Image (tube, coloured by chain):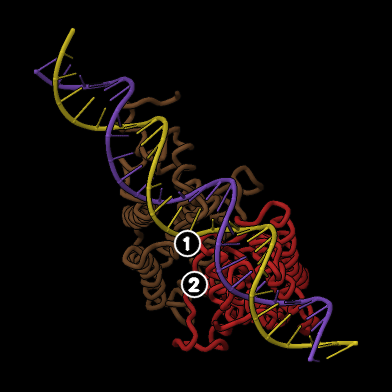
Chain colours: A red, B brown, C purple, D yellow
Amino acid sequence: MARTAGSHSDITGPRIREAALRLFAKHGYAAVSMRRIASEVGVQAGALYNYIPDKQALLFSLLKGHMDELLETWEATPQPADPLARLEAFVRFHIRFTLRRAESIFISYMELRNLEPENFVQIEALRGRYEGMLEQILRDGQAAGQLSVPDTRIAAFALIGMLTGVNTWYREGGRLSEEEVAALYWDMARKAVGAG
Amino acid sequence: MARTAGSHSDITGPRIREAALRLFAKHGYAAVSMRRIASEVGVQAGALYNYIPDKQALLFSLLKGHMDELLETWEATPQPADPLARLEAFVRFHIRFTLRRAESIFISYMELRNLEPENFVQIEALRGRYEGMLEQILRDGQAAGQLSVPDTRIAAFALIGMLTGVNTWYREGGRLSEEEVAALYWDMARKAVGAG
DNA sequence: TCTTTATCTGAACACACGTTCAGATCAAGC
DNA sequence: GCTTGATCTGAACGTGTGTTCAGATAAAGA
């Protein structure tokens, strides 16, 4: 037996979350059974319930953790005073985050519909905050005359869609490095918002 | 009993596909049971098997049908000789399609991972053809000196990501009409590819 | 060394799943 | 009006689901 009783509480918890994240991202929440997650961790299904109340809470915890980390990390990055520089920082931040947390990003877009309503509204609120931050940058830039978009709200959505799309094609070790991808996307994003 | 034996073959088939499309888009392939689809149609689960060999074939058929329609509709739309005009046509076409076939677009991005390998490669090939068409337009525009992107392949991905993202926020009867949305996105897309 | 306690096993629960199929039912063709 | 054949029902099959829990196990503290 790979794992026996009374042993690895401090290591099993994180491993459950990692396995669940990977499996949810690959196959989808509904398609992954608790037994499958448990077997990935090297444990019986019942043991999972020492760490989470139920499957839904596991999904919610992953999404919540991801959104919290996204917001905290962004808020902790140095924010230039100049709106255009702040926009560049945002674009590069989002690309980096999307590439390094590919699975989290993926399920946080994909599995929203599998959240129970009260969980859904919480995650949606966090996402709204994040989008709002980008929109604020665009408004500032607009006010400063550094860029021109017909509609800051739509522009924010369009930019995030464009940036997040990177994880539909990017593969580590491919033709382009993370830095090159960020540069390419910043070039297009900058032009898209009319900041020559 | 709402529906009895020996009756509505020509109407049940399409209704199954419609119900499956709607339910798959809302809850995800794995989360929707055959019994649920059947009940939506007003029929017992067993009756579905007069129309499809199994659940997987139903999903594949929906995705294949969608991709075929996407490609055929695009190929049937008049293509201006001028690359920039062709790009505008593509952008407007994609926005319109994304808004009008929201559910199809959604599952064709969302449920790829639930396709069995041999089905997956077929759909992926069709998607590749579609993306290739956009990339060709960008290459033509580049050659004609009408636009400038650092990388036509990445630009194509970025544009499609941006355009498809519209269905994460667009709601019918909202603040903007389909035409207005298309105009906003074309404005940003045009600038993004450096076609002032 | 012994006891305690967190941790895990293994079996069980009730239920839902995709799929099959014999038999009922009705529309259409003769 | 009778027969035929497509269409649907309703029950069943084996398997898998999320979750619970009594009992086994081993690490930690006295």
Q: Residues within 10 Å of mark 1 (few under 14, many from 20)?
A: some
Q: Compare residues A114 and B68 and report the one nearer the observer.
A: A114
Mark 1 secondary-structure assignment: helix
Image-based side of A34 in relation to A144, left or right: left
What is the three-letter code of the residue carrying label 2? Thr
Q: Tell me what residue is drawn at x 34 percent, y 50 percent.
A: B54
A83 shown above or below B47: below
Task: Tell how many labels.
Answer: 2
Residue A48 is situated, as x and y percent measured from the top left of the image, at 65, 69
Residue A141 is situated, as x and y percent measured from the top left of the image, at 74, 72
A39 shown above or below A178: above
Q: Tell me what residue is drawn at x 62 percent, y 42 percent.
A: B173
Q: Which residue is mark 1?
A: B109
Residue A188 is situated, as x and y percent measured from the top left of the image, at 56, 76
Which mark is on residue B121? none
Mark 2 secondary-structure assignment: helix
Q: Which residue is mark 2?
A: A168
Determine contact: label 1, label 2, CB under 8 Å: yes
Q: Residues within 10 Å of mark 2 (few under 14, many from 20)?
A: few
Q: What chain letter is assigned to the residue under label 1?
A: B
